[in-house]
Image (cartoon, rainbow, N blue to C red):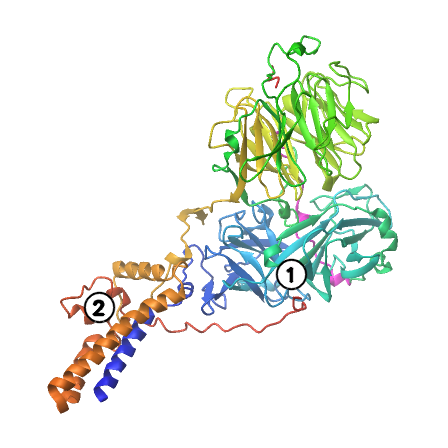
């Protein structure tokens, strides 16, 4: 019996040794080595940025790398790459800072930091792409706590790949001794999917004007909420120097419920929502910023510099994972009259002691930077602007069969209320040099109207034709728009008319213009190009056109309201001048109408209510012609250009509407753009482009941008190394060669592959153990039969020899390689990597302790290219 026990002991030792080879995949983080970042020896604390906290959790230590600010109100930034590729969730934040040295800290998530240095002056910006504020800490302000089961999603296909830490050093007198600072924040992350996902809702005023000397000025924001329920747990306010108090509310059935109220002159951290507040479909979110114009001699507008103002109210919320939206905005005031009933507290400034007033995020250091001709709208990036950029890339959906549809010249595209694609095409008619005379009168009336259905409703997923209409109505189709009720609004350049069509009506519901009669008065058009319908007022905007240079506005029933625009003069085109206003898009959040001014190669935007010019967006990449534009809620503007001059590239563009900056460009893979004529985008960033010459429609979808693999640190070009491949093996008694260490690291990476589940590994371990156990039982049985009473003694001796081989010479550890090498029938290959001789692999593996749960939020409830 003793021999059997010895055999079982041997098997147990073998199993223990095998388990060492199949360590917790997250244990690789324990040995993570950031080859481009080193902390000063003067810094106290952990110099390992990643610490394993168990099977699924790990901690990420984000610290300044030993800095000494030289002047007060210095803003320094540093970045840290997320050391995992798969999804992870930030579930807790631990500040590592003292109010004696640090005024406040902000943590951002993004994909492309503004610099690749160890740290940099934040005046250079935080990120070059979209960045979300994940955490804020300030002196005398409570830290942000997430409720249990709630996390910010990072990594994976859609999450941020970098964390960027911004630290504001207010008074540098604390650095008289020249010590180095390593302030920062420790994150607790987990790979366990969180049932609730945290997100940010930004309420922002965009058109407030503060008159000079005015004692009290209100900036009001209000939006209907029309998504799945969200639960609010923290808020943050932001203005510049003129802000006195910012208040946010939920309005439900006329009742105002306070979300949060704070002075923007206090530390601008995220403060906990004191009482549970949930937002349901149909509720209204409302906010008011109270300003004063006293002390100013000129008007103050919303902007990004110290002389401008801002009115921002951030709300941190969580939603069920299956419905989660990570970011939402509100920039309108849908009901100004409702603010007559706002609680009086919103109109009472919060007293702030002078020694508590903070410098507002470094805006006092910044000046508006004028740019070259490439864009008249670019401004320096700031943490309050970063929310409008995006971190995606547009690529053709190469498996979409719609590119093979049999179409005529594609002139217009739109999306109906069901998000189906609607195509307006010319069938067997073609616009060419014989279509019009010098007076723009159509010359091919003898052909009759197009006999094919010119309006096709297409399934966006498989390109099946769901419906069709428009037969025998049009001669030369051009623009297409669809109103909120699903009615089609189209233009015909041959007929010089605009039509409103019901989906199933055979006759037009409304006709604007005189058939086949070009003109420029209130009742005539001259080759009108496009239509846009205001979803709130129902007003109809018509771009008119190839032989007029104006925008004409009509009431919903077709009554003339106003017009603006004129022909481009000689020299540089001025605001409000057009050379073929070719495409329209409404920007409801900003109350603007934007026009693709085709032959001037630019976009002009106007206030939709008055026609007042507001801005121009023009880039060299546009070339000489810009054909079409499309806006989606959230601040993205899509466009496509033409190719009038050699060297110009025909491509699609994605722009940040607020800044005018180009975020991305894209081209098709199948076929090539010839004359892309119209573009339409959906809220999920699916883009369709129709081409008049190629007679096709492309579908493009958004994908995550590729990570930058090459970065510059301290002037040296280095390659980013994925976390899994930078494992440090510290061998205590017997150092291994570099080659052996690399082999061991490679093996560990293979074992830590996320694709191998724990169950599979366990199963693979159990099988050989069962086999060995069976062999041991069989040997025991044979020995008993052959040797009888002497079996126990001989087995004990045999066990000693086997154990000696397993242990190796003079070693206290197991070596499966030596053991199996002693048997000719086994190959040594692959087992040396499992050697644990002299290894301290087990040391400190479980040093990390779970942080105590502190939650301030409630638990969740259950000719010139004439075409």
* Residue 168 visible here: no
Tell me: residue 646, above or below residue 747.
above
- Residues 48 and 824: in front is 824
Tag 2 secondary structure: helix
| Residue furthest bottom in the image | 789
Which numbered disc, 2 or 1, marks the residue that appears first in the sequence? 1
Q: Which mark is residue 63?
A: none
Neighbour tally class for label 1: few under 14, some 14-19, many 20 plus, Cα within 10 Å: many
Q: Identify the image quadrant of residue 371.
A: top right
The percent coordinates of residue 267 (x first, y second) are 70, 60
- Residues 396 and 215: in front is 396
Q: Is residue 3 left or right of residue 72?
A: left
**Residue at image point 65% right, 69% down:** 859
Q: Is residue 361 magenta?
A: yes
Residue extent of the magenta highlight: 353-375
Residue picked out by circle 2: 817
The percent coordinates of residue 828 (x first, y second) are 19, 64
The percent coordinates of residue 356 (x first, y second) are 73, 62
- Classified by dominant secondary structure, the portion drawn in magenta counts as loop
Report the mark closest to the observer, 2 or 1: 2
Residue picked out by circle 1: 103
């Amino acid at each position: 019996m003793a021999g059997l026990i010895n055999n079982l002991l041997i098997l147990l030792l073998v199993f223990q040794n095998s388990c060492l080879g199949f360590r917790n995949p997250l244990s690789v983080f324990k040995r993570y080595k950031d080859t481009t970042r080193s902390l000063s020896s003067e810094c106290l604390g952990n110099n390992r940025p990643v610490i394993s906290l168990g099977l699924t959790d790990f901690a990420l230590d984000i610290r300044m790398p030993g800095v000494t600010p030289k002047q007060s109100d210095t803003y320094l930034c540093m970045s840290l790459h997320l050391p995992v590729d798969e999804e992870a969730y930030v579930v807790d934040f631990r500040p590592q800072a003292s109010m004696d040295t640090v005024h406040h800290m902000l943590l951002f998530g993004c994909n492309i930091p503004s610099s690749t240095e160890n740290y940099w002056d934040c005046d250079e910006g935080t990120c070059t792409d979209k960045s979300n504020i994940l955490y804020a800490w300030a002196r005398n302000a409570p830290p942000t706590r997430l409720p249990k089961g709630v996390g910010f999603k990072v990594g994976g296909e859609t999450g941020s790949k970098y964390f960027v830490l911004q630290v504001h050093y207010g008074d540098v007198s604390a650095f008289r001794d020249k010590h180095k600072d390593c302030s920062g924040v420790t994150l607790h992350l987990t790979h366990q999917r969180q049932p609730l996902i945290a997100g940010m809702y930004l309420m922002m005023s965009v058109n407030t004007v503060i008159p000079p000397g005015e004692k009290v000025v209100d900036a009001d924001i209000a939006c209907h909420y029309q998504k799945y329920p969200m639960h609010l747990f923290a808020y943050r306010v932001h203005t510049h120097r003129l802000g006195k108090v910012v208040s946010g509310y939920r309005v439900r059935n006329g009742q105002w419920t306070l979300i949060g109220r704070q002075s923007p002159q206090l530390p601008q951290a995220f403060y906990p929502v004191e009482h549970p507040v949930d937002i349901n479909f149909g509720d209204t979110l409302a906010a008011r910023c109270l300003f004063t114009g006293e002390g100013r001699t000129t008007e103050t507008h919303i902007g990004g510099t110290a002389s401008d103002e801002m009115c921002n109210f951030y709300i941190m919320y969580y939603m069920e994972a299956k419905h989660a939206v990570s970011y939402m905005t509100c920039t309108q005031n849908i009901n100004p009259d409702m603010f007559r009933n706002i609680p009086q507290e919103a109109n009472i400034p919060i007293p702030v002691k002078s020694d508590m007033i903070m410098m507002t995020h470094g805006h006092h250091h910044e000046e508006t930077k004028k740019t070259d001709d490439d864009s008249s709208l670019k401004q320096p990036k700031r943490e309050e602007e970063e929310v409008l950029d995006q971190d995606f890339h547009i690529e053709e959906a190469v498996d979409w069969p719609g590119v093979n549809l049999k179409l005529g010249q594609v002139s217009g595209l739109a999306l109906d209320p069901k998000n189906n694609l609607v195509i307006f095409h010319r069938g067997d008619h073609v616009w060419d040099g014989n279509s019009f005379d010098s007076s723009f009168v159509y010359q091919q009336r003898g052909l009759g109207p197009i006999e094919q259905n010119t309006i096709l409703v297409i399934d966006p997923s498989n390109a099946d034709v769901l419906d069709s209409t428009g037969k025998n109505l049009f001669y030369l189709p051009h623009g297409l728009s669809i109103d909120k009720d699903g009615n089609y609004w189209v233009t015909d350049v041959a007929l010089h008319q605009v039509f409103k069509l019901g989906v199933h009506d055979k006759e037009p519901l409304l006709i604007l213009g005189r058939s086949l009669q070009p003109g420029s008065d209130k009742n005539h058009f001259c080759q009108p190009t496009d239509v846009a319908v205001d979803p709130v007022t129902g007003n109809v905007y018509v771009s008119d056109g190839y032989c007029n240079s104006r925008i004409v506005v009509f009431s919903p029933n077709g009554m003339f309201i106003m017009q603006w625009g004129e022909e481009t003069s000689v020299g540089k085109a001025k605001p409000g001048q057009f050379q073929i206003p070719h495409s329209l898009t409404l920007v409801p959040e900003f109350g603007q109408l934007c026009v693709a001014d085709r032959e001037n190669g630019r976009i002009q935007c106007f206030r939709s209510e008055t026609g007042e010019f507001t801005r121009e967006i023009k880039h060299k990449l546009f070339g000489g012609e810009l054909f079409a534009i499309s806006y989606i809620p959230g601040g993205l503007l899509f466009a496509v250009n033409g190719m009038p001059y050699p060297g110009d590239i025909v491509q699609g563009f994605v722009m940040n509407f607020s800044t005018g900056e180009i975020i991305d460009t894209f081209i098709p893979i199948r076929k090539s753009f010839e004359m892309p004529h119209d573009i339409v985008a959906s809220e999920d960033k699916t883009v369709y482009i129709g081409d008049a010459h190629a007679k096709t429609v492309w579908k493009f979808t958004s994908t995550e941008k590729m990570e930058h693999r090459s970065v510059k640190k301290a002037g040296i070009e280095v390659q980013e190394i994925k976390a899994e491949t930078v494992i440090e093996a510290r061998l205590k008694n017997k150092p291994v060669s570099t080659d052996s260490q690399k082999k061991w690291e490679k093996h560990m990476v293979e074992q830590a592959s996320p694709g191998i589940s724990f169950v599979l590994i366990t199963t693979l371990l159990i099988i050989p153990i069962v086999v060995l156990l069976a062999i041991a039982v069989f040997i025991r049985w044979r020995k008993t039969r052959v040797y009888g009473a002497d079996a126990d003694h001989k087995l004990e001796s045999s066990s000693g020899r086997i154990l000696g081989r397993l242990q190796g010479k003079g070693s206290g550890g197991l070596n499966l390689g030596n053991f199996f090498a002693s048997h000719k029938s086994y190959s040594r290959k692959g087992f040396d990597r499992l050697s644990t001789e002299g290894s301290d692999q087990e040391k400190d593996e479980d040093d990390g302790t779970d942080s105590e749960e502190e939650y301030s939020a409630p638990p969740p409830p259950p000719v010139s290219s004439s075409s």
